[in-house]
Image: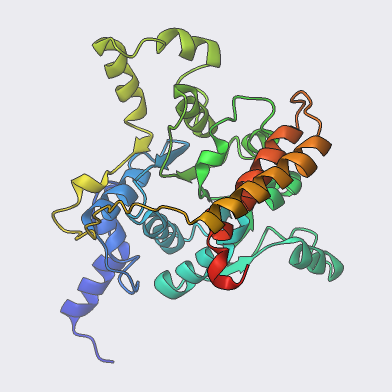
């Protein structure tokens, strides 16, 4: 390939130019070959994660269905292009293969699934640091990362991505062993947390997620409670928003309807009247559960495990549900 002086200078410029952390040009070369159709909010989220090079991480909290995995893939692609390739992805066990396929097929990033079997196999062949891979993104489950917390802590990660991060929102509670173990192991590592529900039951859950990234954002639990106990005051609410602004980015579905055509769903209510035979079946099963299951599962106080009565109620709901009520058609 013969290059003119002009083209040689152009390519040299493209290879050596430096872009601001909040510039779209920063991502352009890293995702040029990616097999994804990017939306503006996804690019914004990825740039938000790069906005402050001195921060300890970011929380991407877009609503369900807006492509948080794609946003994380953009960030990982840029890190990869910058030769910062010690990357760990921690995800629920049932999502490990999905992450593997997404990063491989859409962003062409080499990955490996690390679990007990592959970990032990690496140890047997003399690799005593299985987490320290060469030019490969490591993907593992929360449970495995917790069991190998010492290895996770001793690896110099360039970035740690944590999917379904709402699992960590109760980290302020000592009873959440997995969250507290990982928080200690990743204390000085740069983290990218992904969740669609950063807040569900209590404002303290938001405190937990943010403190997982940076403990200094809100201070300790006591001071957070005292300062943000009354969000009805405009000044207090504004202070909370300002504290979250540098660390949390969230996009709502209603903000992207101009370029994403969501399926319009219309709820329909259908009246259902069970037949006499179905009523008899329901009463029979309910009576059996009462007489056999509940009588044998003596209620006991909650002591760190699920109470027996909760198990009994769960069983009762399962066996008296609509699946069995409609069993007449299946010959029941």
Rendered image quadrant of residue 303: top right
In the image: residue 93, left or right of residue 232: right
Residue at the right extreme, as displayed? 124
Q: Residue at x 35, y 23 (%)?
A: 243
**Rendering quarter of residue 241:** top left
- Residue visible at 43% across and 32% down in the picture: 199
Q: Which quadrant does the N terminus fall into?
A: bottom left
Q: Is residue 278 left or right of residue 146?
A: left
Q: Position of residue 205 (x, y in %)?
A: 49, 28
Q: Residue at x 41, y 70 (%)?
A: 107
Q: Is residue 199 above or below residue 194?
A: above
Residue 16 placement (x, y as % from top left): 31, 62
Q: Image quadrant for the C terminus?
A: bottom right
Residue 20 percent coordinates (x, y): 27, 48
Outermost residue on the bottom side: it is: 1
Residue 217 visible, this angle: no
Q: Residue at coordinates 68% horizontally, 46% vertically from top-left?
A: 315
Instruction: Give the farthest residue toward the front.
Output: 276
Q: Is residue 249 above or below residue 88?
A: above
Q: Is residue 292 above or below residue 268?
A: above
Residue 306 x %, y % = 72, 35
Q: In the current view of this chain or complex, which residue is farthest to the top?
A: 226
Question: Observer-nearest residue: 17 or 201?
Answer: 201
Q: Nearer the viewer, residue 53 or 119?
A: 119
């Amino acid at each position: 390939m013969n290059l003119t002086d002009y083209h040689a200078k152009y390519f040299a410029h493209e290879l050596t130019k430096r872009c601001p952390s909040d510039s779209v040009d920063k991502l352009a070369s890293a995702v040029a070959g990616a097999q994804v159709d990017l939306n503006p909010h996804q690019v914004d989220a990825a740039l938000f994660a790069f906005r402050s090079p001195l921060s300890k991480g970011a929380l991407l909290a877009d609503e369900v269905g807006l492509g948080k995995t794609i946003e994380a893939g953009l960030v990982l692609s840029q890190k990869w292009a910058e030769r910062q390739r010690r990357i760990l992805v921690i995800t629920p066990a049932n999502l490990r293969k999905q992450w593997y396929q997404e990063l491989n097929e859409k962003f062409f990033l080499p990955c490996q699934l690390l679990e007990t079997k592959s970990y032990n196999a690496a140890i047997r062949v003399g690799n005593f640091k299985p987490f320290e891979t060469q030019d490969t993104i490591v993907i593992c489950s929360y449970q495995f990362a917790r069991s190998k917390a010492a290895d996770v802590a001793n690896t110099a990660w360039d970035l740690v991505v944590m999917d379904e991060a709402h699992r960590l929102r109760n980290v302020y509670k000592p009873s959440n062993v997995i969250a507290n173990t990982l928080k200690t192991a990743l204390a000085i590592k740069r983290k990218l947390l992904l969740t669609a529900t950063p807040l569900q039951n209590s404002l303290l859950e938001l405190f937990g997620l943010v403190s997982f990234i940076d403990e200094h954002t809100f201070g300790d639990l006591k001071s957070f409670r005292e300062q943000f106990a009354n969000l009805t005051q405009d000044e207090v609410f504004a202070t909370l928003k300002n504290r979250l602004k540098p660390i949390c980015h969230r996009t709502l579905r209603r903000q992207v309807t101009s370029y994403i055509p969501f399926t319009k769903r219309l709820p329909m209510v259908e009246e259902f009247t069970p037949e006499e035979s179905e009523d008899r079946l329901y009463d029979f099963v309910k009576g059996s559960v009462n007489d056999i299951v509940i009588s044998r599962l003596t209620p006991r106080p909650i002591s760190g495990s699920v109470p027996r009565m909760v198990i009994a109620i769960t069983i009762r709901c399962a066996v008296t549900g609509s699946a069995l009520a409609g069993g007449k058609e299946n010959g029941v």
